[in-house]
Every structure is written in structure tokens, then in C-alpha cells.
Amino acid sequence: MTADQQLAFRTISSTNPRSDSERDAIHGNPGFGKYFTDHMVAIDWTNDLGWHNAEVRPYGPLLLDPAASVLHYAQEIFEGLKAYRHPDGSIWTFRPEANALRMQRSAHRLALPALPSEIFIESIRQLVRADAAWVPGAPETSLYLRPFMISNENFLGVRAAHQAAYYVIASPVGPYFAKGVAPVSIWVSTDYARAAVGGTGAAKCGGNYAASLLPQQQAYEHDCSQVLFLDPQHGKYLEELGGMNIVMVHRDGTVITPELSGSILEGVTRLSILQLARDRGHPVQERKVSFDELRDGMVSGEIAEVFACGTAAVIAPIAALKGRDFVVGDPAAPAGKLTMSLRQELTDIQHGRRPDRHGWMMRLV
Ligand code: COI
């Protein structure tokens, strides 16, 4: 299939959708990733036929053979993006081409087939059209879209699967963290790394997140919401959090973030925040940042603000860092000014409250 080919989608409507009142109740308190819409997208792929059988169908369990290779060798990748209801009722998404391209890069690393960007975007459009009523409109809410791909060939030999499937599910969401947009504390993991040199750290694959769960548990045990990983080679340079990138603001206004080292994820929110900061005239540095630089800078005040960013949480202010033998920052400190103003600007663009000067938004409905 060439990159500009499109697939015709078949729609099988749910015969048992949630009632308006059930949906309203979910929209009233959506949490994050707890509830799912009435439909999903499924597309099959085989070596012989390429991408085929595209459908929007009722949300429901997948039928997998116990020998399906994903269950044994973890050939799985995913994406995360959101649909936003604008004040006039229209529904939009944010930079979906960037997610489509990243999924192609992840597919390459995990030896899965590349899904053409046109099909990726059409799959999002089809699902959001079918479940448009599920896109919430309250502040800080959106419909989180989770495209993912698995190898589903029933074969235990260790090689790239000759058969795969792509799905999209959707979940109405509020803030990612239970405390809302309040500053969080971060656990600095010195016991574990998230990714290896030459490994899959830059791919959005489930295995990276699986590797983050034990240190994430340690974070919870220390009253921290996320874990910060250091580079796998030296244990010295900042990489990323369990599921978000990290950004610092120097007191001279410079915005600093770890460079794309090959083992961190190229976040779409990271990219967009750096652009908004540049637009405001802030110098932006993508470079190696040692943990010592961050810790000492927070203590001296050279580093004035720290935040995490990702699609799910947008921007989460970081108030404190904790590790085996240190605490820096004050867990009760308020969020940084630039942090919150960049957050406001980005969410205003996404929710249609401010002009989209970079052409980042795509209308879906
Ligand atoms: C996202 O931000 O979309 C992610 O995939 C990260 C995950 C922690 C929800």
C-alpha cells in the first residue's frame, strides 16, 4: 500500500450504546482512562494483503489465540492524542500527523508494519464521528484517543509477525493526575533505567511502560506521582519520566530540556511547548542535562521552574524531587508562572479559545 492510499471503512453500529444519562454521569467525573466509548476501530494487516478490513465496530473484547505473538514477545506499540470540543460544538484534534509519523517510527523499531498517515488520521476521524457525543465539553476535559498495534500471528517462533492488527479506542478524560493540575513530586530512580542504549526508548511501545512500573510503584511509596529516569549508560543525565518529558526554566528565562538521546520519546507536547516558548522569545536549549545540574539549580534558584509534559497530563508542574538520600524543592510550592502560562496557551489553542497560528489543529467533526 502506498502512503497516499486510503481504505474504505465499514461501520457496524453498537446495538447497545450507553444512554445519554449514563454518558452524562461519566462526563461529570471521567477520571483518566476508566470509561470507553461505544465504538472502536479495527484494521487488519497481513504480509500478503497489507492493510485491509477497516471497520468501526462496537467496543468490545479482542479474540486472541493464546499463541498470538504479542502475548509472548510484546510486539506492541501505541499512541495517545485527544479530541477537543470547541465552543461552537465542532470537534478538533491536535497535530495528528505527528502521532502518525511517530507510530511509523515505533513500528519500524518493533518490526511492525507502518500504517500510512492518511489511514491513521482517517481512523481517528471515523471513531470520533461515530462517538461524537462522547467528546466532553467541560474545562480540562477531552476525549483521549488510544491507537495501538499488535502482532497477532499464532506462532511461537521468534521473528517479526507476518500478521498484525491496529485498533483505536477512546476514553473521555479529565486531568491525568487525581489532584488535578496541582504541582507533583517526582521520584528519581537510581535503581532502575527505563531504556537501554540502542534499545526501544524512543519508540512508544508497551514494554517501555512495563519497565517503568516497578520504579513507579517506588515513587508512590514515597508520595511521588511519577518517576524520573536517568540515562542508562552513566546514570547521570536526565531522560524522561515514566510517561512524560521533563522541562526546566532557568531564572534567566531559558527553557531547557534533555535532547532526544535515542532513548527518550519525542513528545508532541514537548515539541509544541518548545515552539510556544520560542515564539515568546525564550531561548530554548535541547541538550544533555545532568541530574546534578537540576538538583543544584533547584537548590540555588538557578532553575526557577520544572515541569513534566505529555498528551495525557498536558503540563504538570513539578514542585519537588525525591531520591534515596535527598529531597529538593518543596512539595507544597506553587506552580511556576511560565509553566502555567504555557499550559494555558497550549490548552487555549487545543480547546479553540485562542488562534491556532501554527496550524496545529485539525477539524474532525
Ligand atoms: C500520553 O501522554 O498520551 C501517554 O501516552 C502517557 C501515558 C502516561 C498516558
Image (cartoon, helix red, strand yellow):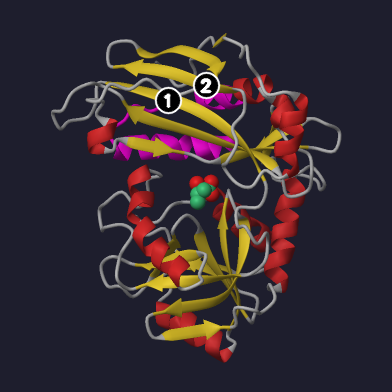
Q: Nearer the viewer, residue 71 or 311?
A: 71
**Which residue is found at the position 82% from the left and 31% from the top?**
89
Q: Position of residue 101 (x, y in %)?
A: 47, 36
Residue 170 against residue 54 in the figure, above or below: below
Could you say which quadrant of the image residue 336 lies in? bottom right
Residue 145 against residue 283 in the figure, above or below: above
The earlier-in-sequence mark between 2 and 1 is 2
Callout 2–callout 1 Cβ contact below 8 Å: yes
What residue is pinned by disc 2? 41
The magenta-colored residue range is 96-124
Q: Nearer the viewer, residue 2 or 55?
A: 55
Q: Is mark 2 within 8 Å of ligand 1?
A: no
- Residue 6 visible in the current orientation: no
Count of numbered circles in the view? 2
Residue 356 against residue 66 in the figure, above or below: below
- Residue that protrudes farthest toward the left in the picture: 157
Query: In what quadrant of the picture does the C terminus appear?
Result: top right
Task: Please rate how many residues cluster around mark 2, counting C-alpha atoms within 10 Å: few if below 14, some from 14 to 19, many from 20.
Answer: many
Q: Amino acid at mark 2?
A: Val
Q: Amino acid at mark 1?
A: Tyr
Task: Please rate how many residues cluster around mark 1, counting C-alpha atoms within 10 Å: few if below 14, some from 14 to 19, many from 20.
Answer: many
Could you say which quadrant of the image residue 263 lies in? bottom left
Dot 2 falls on a residue whose secondary structure is strand
What residue is pinned by disc 1? 166
- Residue 161 visible in the current orientation: yes
**Which residue is found at the position 25% from the left and 67% from the top?**
233
- Residue that protrudes farthest toward the bottom in the picture: 300
Q: Position of residue 3 (x, y in %)?
A: 45, 22
Q: Position of residue 123 (x, y in %)?
A: 55, 23
